[in-house]
Image (cartoon, rainbow, N blue to C red):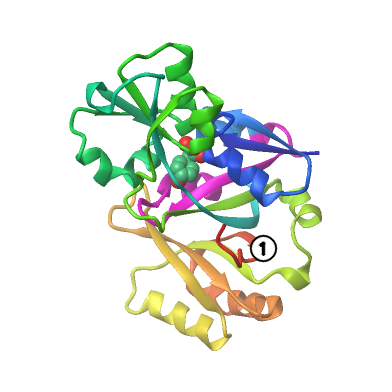
């Protein structure tokens, strides 16, 4: 049985992602109130796994989650790319024009921004979770409230669906990382022959061409850069940390490339080596 910590409650997208990634296996999800709470739970028991959203094709990156991962000792052991579709739902019998408030996870609200702008009667109020918002509306009988969540969550909490597919663009996908304790990652993660992606983070000195030199070396070793994300370094104005995702054919070449760039970068941390998600579900 795999125990996976998630941010959110039953029926949220992390719940769906955990079951999809470990399809065919027995999975129990452990709900947490927030991403930091999820990291606290993970650090209390090394047998637990975690799943965490890091970017969405409409709303962009979850920068806080990049930082949480960097500050932890957890390792990335896999990734999942999943289609996200939202519904607007409310207590049975309510009309959309009479609703006054909409509740959901901030990322979900961002993904439905255009739809919500067309409904100014709905005051946008962020909650910790999509399914959690639906659950709250049902439990507290919140007349006048709507939730943005997945269709499954609306059904699970007995709400009526007022509109389907309210995301701004149908090509709405979220990328999730699968996390494990550093000591167990080797056993649970993919075998060396299946590793073709890595996530690393580093800082650079403020010198001319510093980033360009790193990219040139990576290219020389046939390492493809699939994503680069910078975040501000707190306490060092206008300095940045670089989160980089790399794909490659040979793990040996990756290690050679990392050895080659090491003298040119600072605070290097390898967040994980894993198998690239080849399909988008
Ligand atoms: O609220 C949920 O259902 C979640 O699982 C959170 C979350 C996120 O963190 O991005 C997951 C996927 C979607 O992008 C929307 C929300």
Which residue is drawn at the image coordinates 52% and 32% (left, top)?
153
Residue 156 sits above or below residue 118 on the image: above
Which residue is drawn at the image coordinates 66% and 36% (left, top)?
43
From where the camera sits, is residue 279 visible?
yes
Q: Residues within 10 Å of mark 1 (few under 14, many from 20)?
A: many
Q: Which residues are magenta?
A: 42-70
Instruction: State yes or no: Cβ of the residue under disc 1 lies below 8 Å from any atom of ligand 1.
Output: no
Between residues 23 and 219, which one lies in front from this camera angle? Answer: 23
Between residues 267 and 249, which one lies in front from this camera angle? Answer: 249
Is disc 1 placed on a helix, strand or loop? strand
User: Residue 215: where, in percent of width, then height?
Assistant: 45, 79
The quadrant of the image that shows the C terminus is bottom right
From where the camera sits, is residue 126 visible?
no
Between residues 223 and 267, which one lies in front from this camera angle? Answer: 223
User: Residue 205: where, in percent of width, then height?
Assistant: 39, 68
Which residue is drawn at the image coordinates 43% and 81% (left, top)?
213
Residue 74 sits above or below residue 31 on the image: below
Q: Number of marks in the image?
A: 1
Residue 60 lies in the magenta-colored region: yes
Residue 253 sits above or below residue 198 on the image: below
Q: Which residue is mark 1?
A: 274
User: Residue 69: where, in percent of width, then height?
Assistant: 55, 48
Residue 10 lies in the magenta-colored region: no
Question: Going by the picture, which residue comes out furthest to the top?
Answer: 140
């Amino acid at each position: 049985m795999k125990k996976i910590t998630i941010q959110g409650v039953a029926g949220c997208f992390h719940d769906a992602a955990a079951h999809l990634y470990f399809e065919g296996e027995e999975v129990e999800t452990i709900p947490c109130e927030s991403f930091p709470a999820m990291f606290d739970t993970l650090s209390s028991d090394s047998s637990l796994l975690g799943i965490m959203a890091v970017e969405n094709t409409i709303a962009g990156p979850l920068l806080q989650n990049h930082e949480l991962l960097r500050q932890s000792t957890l390792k990335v052991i896999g990734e999942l790319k999943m289609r996200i579709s939202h519904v607007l739902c409310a207590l049975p019998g309510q009309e959309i024009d009479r609703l006054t408030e909409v509740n959901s996870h901030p990322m979900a609200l961002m993904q439905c921004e255009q739809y919500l702008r067309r409904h100014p009667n709905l005051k946008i109020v962020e909650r910790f979770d999509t399914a959690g918002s639906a659950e709250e509306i049902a439990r507290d009988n919140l007349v006048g409230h709507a939730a943005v969540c997945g269709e499954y969550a609306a059904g699970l909490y007995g709400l009526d669906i007022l509109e389907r597919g309210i995301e701004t663009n149908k090509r709405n996908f979220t990328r999730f990382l699968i996390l494990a304790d550093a000591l167990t990652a080797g056993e649970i993660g993919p075998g060396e022959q299946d590793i073709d992606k890595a996530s690393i983070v580093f800082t650079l000195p403020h010198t001319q061409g510093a980033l360009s030199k790193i990219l040139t070396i990576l290219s020389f070793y046939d390492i493809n850069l699939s994503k680069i994300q910078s975040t501000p370094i707190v306490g060092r104005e206008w300095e940045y940390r670089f989160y980089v995702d790399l794909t490659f054919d040979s793990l040996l070449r990756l290690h050679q490339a990392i050895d080659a760039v090491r003298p040119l970068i600072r605070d290097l941390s390898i967040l994980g080596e894993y198998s690239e998600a080849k399909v988008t579900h």
